[in-house]
């Protein structure tokens, strides 16, 4: 099939590359000329394990192209994906200006003789498919007056469920694909497009547009609830002398609960959960529904991101002035350089405000952090260099390379054998044996 993907951000690039991988011819469009030049020169613009190989191969085979011209990209396209940013506006609702801007352009460009499926891939509020439809029709009425544009397209909601770090795998082998449309022609096109991705029998779930839009928010909000619930259980464990790891295993073995997404820590971050929980709460607010669980989740997460700070302060008798900390992990989770809403940043801000100094290390997110913190903190070249002369080691992201470090090297570099672990990376019993004062989340010291 011939596909156009509008927007070459994270979702657009993964979507375009993975569709090219199954033999489709994909043209990706972006307004950012620099980005397009880089991509055309074979330079990938995001960090995502496994993506570069597919990107280079499909580009070489001529199935993956990049352009700044929307008009060129959509010529003869059977499907147009909208993978555009939907940043939160001042009121917390997703801002649709980019999506509706492109819808307006499509109204000028669509060919009445060529049926096309237009797909919302971005996470958009319930009702957006209708808005996109109406915006295209309104624009066509002005710019292509007299032509019957309304019958040459359908707008479909097809939310993505990719996780950063494993996005290629999630895309190529999805648990399910949710497709929101009731238009028979669009159902056929989407079914043909996705059949190669669900050969193991995972479902393509067809539903109406609004249900598909809400499914995406419900999925992310539910996972945020699950994490926040465990974070509160961890708080209980700390106060009751129970062990959250045991409780996690104890409840996770029940299929109805499931083992995944029960890991307590210093809160969820990233570009999705915080934004989507907030946007769903805003949608509820707009329709006068008091969605109490979402408010609680946002409160719990705000508290959890700073969970280690009172513990650190308590250890140092409430005075962190002049103390120096090593911080391992900046990205909001491992295997990404994404630092959006990263809990590590909330810790850095709190420690700096207390008069402490910090040396940081992250395998991928140093450059992104330099552009945020400049010379306010020190950047180490490796995990051990960050430790030099620090009063304690703090861990904010559970990168694999942090899991079995050289503890001798750690203790000889640190001033104290002291670790505050926000991601439960180490075994408390082992830490005790090694003579560390070790505090983690919801487990016995
Ligand atoms: C999330 C969803 O998992 C994807 O399905 C969805 O497509 C995506 O948002 C999106 O809307 O685009 P992502 O933000 O990449 O994906 O990251 P996750 O792996 O879900 O982790 C989110 C946060 O939750 C991280 O900060 C992580 O540390 C935290 N987390 C996760 C926990 O604290 N505990 C857990 O048990 C799991």
Image (tube, helix red, strand yellow):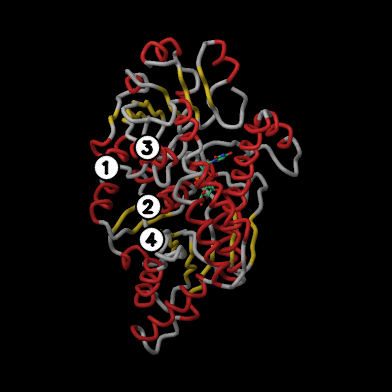
Give the image location of residue 266, x and y in percent: 51, 38
Of 327 and 24, the residue lying toward us: 327
Give the image location of residue 336, x and y in percent: 42, 38
Distance from Cα at disc 1 to Cα at disc 4: 27 Å
Question: Circle 4 sits on which residue?
Answer: 6
Question: Circle 3 sits on which residue?
Answer: 348
Q: Is residue 253 left or right of residue 383?
A: right
Q: In which quarter of the image is residue 241?
A: top right
Asked if marks 4 and 3 touch (Cβ < 8 Å), the reply is: no
- Up/down of 273 relative to 267, above or below: below
Give the image location of residue 443, x and y in percent: 61, 27
* Upstream in sequence: badge 4 or badge 3: 4
- Up/down of 408 relative to 27, above or below: above
Distance from Cα at disc 2 to Cα at disc 4: 9 Å
Question: Circle 1 sits on which residue?
Answer: 371
Asked if marks 1 and 4 touch (Cβ < 8 Å), the reply is: no
Which of labels 2 and 4 is toward the front? 2
Q: Which labelled disc corresponds to residue 9?
A: 2
Which of labels 3 and 2 is toward the front? 3
């Amino acid at each position: 099939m011939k596909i156009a993907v509008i927007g070459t951000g994270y979702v657009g690039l993964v979507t375009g590359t993975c569709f090219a991988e199954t033999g489709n011819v994909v043209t990706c469009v972006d307004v950012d000329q620099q980005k397009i030049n880089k991509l055309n020169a074979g330079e990938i613009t995001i960090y995502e394990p496994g993506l570069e190989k597919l990107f280079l191969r499909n580009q070489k085979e001529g199935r993956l192209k990049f352009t700044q011209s929307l008009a060129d990209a959509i010529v003869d396209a059977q499907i147009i994906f909208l993978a555009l940013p939907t940043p939160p506006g001042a009121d917390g609702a997703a801002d649709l200006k980019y999506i509706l801007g492109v819808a307006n352009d499509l109204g000028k460009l669509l060919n009445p003789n060529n049926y096309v499926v237009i797909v919302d891939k971005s996470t958009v509020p319930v009702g957006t498919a209708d808005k996109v439809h109406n915006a295209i029709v309104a624009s066509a009425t002005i710019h292509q007056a007299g032509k019957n544009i309304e019958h040459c397209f359908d707008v479909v909601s097809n939310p993505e469920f990719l996780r950063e770090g494993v996005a290629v795998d999630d895309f190529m082998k999805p648990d399910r694909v949710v497709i929101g449309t009731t238009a028979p022609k669009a159902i056929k096109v989407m079914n043909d497009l996705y059949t190669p991705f669900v050969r193991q029998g995972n479902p393509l779930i067809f539903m109406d547009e609004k249900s598909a839009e809400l499914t995406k928010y419900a999925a992310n909000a539910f996972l945020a609830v699950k994490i926040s619930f465990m974070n509160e259980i961890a708080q209980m464990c700390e106060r009751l002398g129970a062990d959250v790891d045991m409780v996690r295993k104890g409840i996770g073995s029940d299929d109805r609960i499931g083992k995944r997404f029960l890991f307590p820590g210093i809160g969820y971050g990233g570009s999705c959960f915080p934004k989507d929980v907030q946007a769903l709460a805003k949608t509820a607010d707009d329709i006068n529904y008091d969605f109490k669980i979402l408010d609680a989740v946002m409160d719990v997460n705000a508290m959890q991101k700073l969970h280690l700070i009172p513990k650190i302060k308590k250890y140092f008798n409430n005075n962190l002035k002049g103390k120096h900390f090593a911080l391992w992990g900046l990205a909001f989770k491992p295997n990404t350089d994404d630092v959006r809403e990263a809990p590590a940043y909330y810790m850095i801000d709190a420690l700096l405000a207390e008069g402490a100094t910090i040396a940081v290390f992250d395998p991928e997110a140093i450059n992104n952090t330099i552009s945020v913190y400049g010379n306010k903190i020190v950047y180490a070249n490796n995990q051990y260099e960050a430790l030099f002369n620090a009063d304690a080691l703090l861990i904010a992201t559970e990168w694999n390379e942090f899991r079995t470090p050289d503890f001798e090297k750690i203790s000889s570099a640190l001033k104290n054998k002291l670790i505050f672990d926000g991601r439960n990376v180490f075994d408390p019993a082992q830490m005790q044996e090694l003579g560390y004062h070790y505090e983690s989340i919801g487990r016995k010291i």
